[in-house]
Image: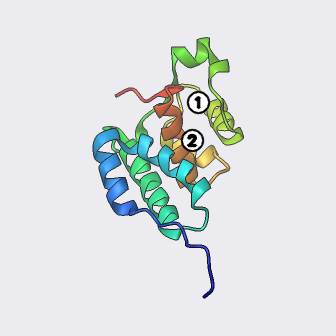
Amino acid sequence: MSSLPKAAPVPDWSRLVADSLTQNGAWYTYLKLIEARGAYPNDLSLRGYTEILRTTIVRDFLAHPKAMQAVPKLTAEFLSNFDRFNLTAQEGYLISLIDGRLDLQKLLILSPFDPFTTLFNLAKLQNERAITVPK
């Protein structure tokens, strides 16, 4: 008899994601899936659910009444305490473009990143309260 190590059971991501979305929302669920990728780096379904959540977050961000004509602005919290925000290089670049006049459509044109990544990073900045998108 060979004693092969037993593979760790793979979580039921569909149930876990659905429950977390209902109880905690998209951002919390997304961040938990990012954490889980450390424990399950080769799990393709986990990667798939992570991308589904990124898409959900971008779709929610674009659900703004003005959609692509919305003009993001830096928050007072960001302007007074920007050291608190741990920005990535992409987020910092997008922050540098926000002047209170350019709408999302123009930001997408000026951004060197693909449109989806740009919108996801803007949604992340909004979630972290670095920017606001007034109605």
Given the image, on which type of amino acid does mark 2 rest?
A: Leu
For label 1, count other residues whose C-alpha is less than 10 Å away and answer few (under 14), some (14-19) or many (20+): some
Res 7 → quadrant: bottom right
From the top left corner, tell me how far across and down residue 125 is, in percent: 53, 33
Labels 1 and 2: the sequence-earlier one? 1
Question: The residue tagged with tag 1: helix, strand or loop?
Answer: loop
Question: Which residue is at a point 63% across and 33% down the rendered structure image?
Answer: 97
With 5 as the anchor, is 120 left or right in this view?
Answer: left
Residue drawn 66% across the image and 30% down it = 96
In this picture the colour scheme is rainbow
Give the structural element (helix, strand or loop) at label 2.
Answer: helix
Query: How many numbered marks have been drawn onto this rendered protein structure?
Result: 2
Which residue is under mark 1? 98
> Residue farthest to the bottom?
1
Rendered location of residue 41, percent (x, y): 61, 62
Q: Which residue is mark 2?
A: 107
The answer, for residue 128, to whether it is visible in the render is yes
Q: Nearer the viewer, residue 115 or 59?
A: 59
- Using the rendered image of the protein, determine whether residue 68 is visible from the camera's viewpoint: no
Residue 45, compared with residue 128, is above or below; it is below
Q: Residue furthest front?
A: 1
Label 1 close to label 2 by CB (< 8 Å): yes
- The structure residue drawn at horizontal position 34% and vertical position 28%, both measured from the top left corner, is 135
Q: Is residue 22 above or below residue 85?
A: below
Q: Amino acid at mark 1?
A: Ile
Label of residue 24 in the image: none
> Is residue 55 placed above or below 4 in the rendered structure?
above
